Amino acid sequence: MAIKEIKQKIEDLRKKLHHWNYAYYVLDNPEVDDAVYDASMRELLEVEKKHPELITPDSPSQRVGTEPVSDFKKVTHKTPLYSLDNALNLDELEDWQEKIFRVLGDSSKIDYVCEMKIDGLAMALTYIDGVLTLGATRGDGDIGEDITNNIKTIRSLPLVLNKEVSGLLEIRGEVFMPIESFEKLNKEQKEKEEKIFANPRNAASGSIRQYDSKITARRDLDMFTYAGIWDACVIARSTSDEAISQEQHQSSEIASPLVRNDKSPKTHLESLEKLKELGFKVNKTSKLCHGLEEVKNFCNSWYEKKHKLPYAIDGVVVKVNDLSLQQELGFTTKSPRWAIAYKYPPEEAKTKVLSITCDVGRTGTLTPVANLEPVLLAGTVVKRASLHNQDIIDKLDVREEDVVTVRKAGEIIPEVVSVDKDKRKHKHESYKLPTKCPICHSKVEREEEESAVRCTNYNCPAQVQRRIEHWCSRDAMDIDGVGESLIEQLLKNNLIEDPIDLYFLNKEQIEKLERMAEKSAQNAITSIQNSKEKNLDRLIYAFGIRHVGKTIADLLTSRFHSIEDLSKTTLEELTEIGGIGPKIAKSVIDFFKTDISEKMINKIKKAGITSQMKQTKIKDNKLAGKILVITGTLESMARSKAEELIKNLGGRATSSVTKNTDFLIAGVEPGSKLKKAKELGISVLSEQEFLELVK
């Protein structure tokens, strides 16, 4: 084959691969099967291997990583990357706006753009004539490090722009690691007994600064772009005049001026639209806000639902939308006057371990707990944090009087994530779990292939209390007004022995207890009696059977119409139900073999709890037998409501995508489940399509 034909073949392959990559990673709309993509990539690699002189920096083959470097070169940014001032509360946002008005001499309403403040790393990218030539870290804002080889491994980042661009184009963006990828990486690191990363930001930082870019390529990094400096480049005109979307963008600690010329965008949103046209990935959650009240509403709204995002954020960046006003406002020595970062309360904090004790859970699991000097974390004062199990304690080497970093796992349960050993001045020994239950002093056991250590006494007072608390919890029988304190008193006064005894209580018995007035006693009794009407899946979950969570409890109701039916089942019957394996089946069988479960079932009959033993009533059969999974944030309803709707229409909502899944419902910012669904050929529904299906 002539060299001219070889060059043409390489060019055609690269063009196809760039386009398919953009469709998959940026548009979330794969155009070819993985097998087709892989075959074309292999073909390109083979041709380039035979003709290495034809390899160029913009080739898709360069995403897989290059030879390791010994050090990162320093680079000076052509345009500085400024830090943002912070607003720690809404009053400080108002102060910021007042400063804007003082500079502009106008207190009329200003339009702002609100963007997620991604907890990642700011990057500066340089494109020359549409080809990526440099990727650099922020550094100190003036000088960063050349990490071009590593940045090229990010699949959502274009190596060649979608449109013809001449001259120099600077792009600002944020590299981050999705939460699911972070958890997967830490699991792999733990299995290899290597470094565990404290949070997604640390994982992204450690991954993007690898000397070996092949390691970076395996770390599943992603990137949002949020600004372009357009004055030194010329972009081919669009063939259509598309309306500017109000749902673009992203954020960062970093911002940079957008210098206007006649062909430059007039607003920040126009700039984002232009970035999108060039092939960059921009965040879809951002919003144009008309005035500061809308900004406040945006900040408050996302604080409540930020944990539904597939990536970590630590606030919202607010920017003046009009770029001419940005120029007029200018900069201080460190920050732009036209942008500010509204910071959410900290998700991590350092504090001191006062002591380490053990809690005993409803299944007997001994959970070590660090009792802490009180510290403010994510808006609440934290005094205790989980240490999970002995394996985690040994890995962290946490001891009493250590200074530790605490965060909220899943943004709910505080946990210790690291120890500052440089500040260790004491001589305390490593902590070991007790060999006997700290509550009832019975022996403890650690089952094979499990990290949990359990008290073997089913009647352990701690287990009894936790089982009753579980029974009353929101996802189980939802008995409002019967909490930890009241349950403790009921047990102490021998008024109950198990959860079913609650249904035989009267108002006078509760009213006599400490801090229980007539009204609160009556509310508790009413809530207890109302819980008799709960559905069967809640009752099964309330029993607290090991390995039987809400999803498994729901699965069981598809086969069994009462607790009595379930108690008489066999291992074979259980394992015939999709989603229930031998481990879960054995746990159910073992539970109902006990005298305690038989006693509880007999008491349930006497208590008159019959309504919830019926199969969940299905309103319609539109989704009969269908399995659906939801990913991302739904705008029209909470996920729990959508799952309840699916169930009422005869379907089943599960949390994992498998080959048995019938539909994936994709909301705003879908996670990796979308990719897996597409790989398996599962039908993907938008939120609107789902609503049309179920109406």
Image (cartoon, rainbow, N blue to C red):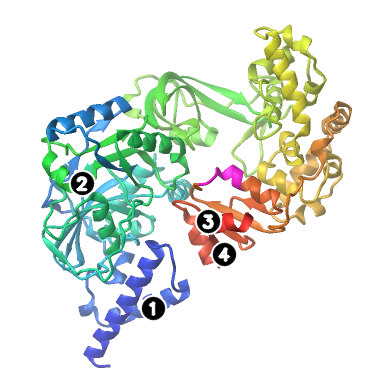
- Looking at the rendered structure, the secondary structure element under dot 4 is strand
Q: Is residue 641 left or right of residue 306?
A: right
Foreground mark, 1 or 4?
Answer: 4
Q: Nearer the viewer, residue 147 or 579?
A: 579
Q: Give the amino acid at mark 2.
A: Asp
Mark 3 neighbour class, 10 Å CA radius: few under 14, some 14 to 19, many 20 or more: some
Find the distance from the CA under tag 1 to the CA under tag 3. Answer: 36 Å
State the image coordinates of residue 506 (x, y, percent, origin top left): 80, 15
Looking at the image, how many numbered discs can be counted on the residues? 4
The magenta region covers 636-642
Q: Give the amino acid at mark 3.
A: Gln
Tag 3 residue? 688
Mark 1 and mark 4 lie on one chain; the one further toward the N terminus is 1
Query: Vertically, is 186 above or below 358?
Result: below
Find the distance from the CA under tag 2 to the CA under tag 3. Answer: 33 Å
Tag 2 residue? 322
Foreground mark, 1 or 3?
Answer: 3
Mark 4 neighbour class, 10 Å CA radius: few under 14, some 14 to 19, many 20 or more: few
Mark 2 and mark 3 lie on one chain; the one further toward the N terminus is 2
Find the distance from the CA under tag 2 to the CA under tag 4. Answer: 41 Å
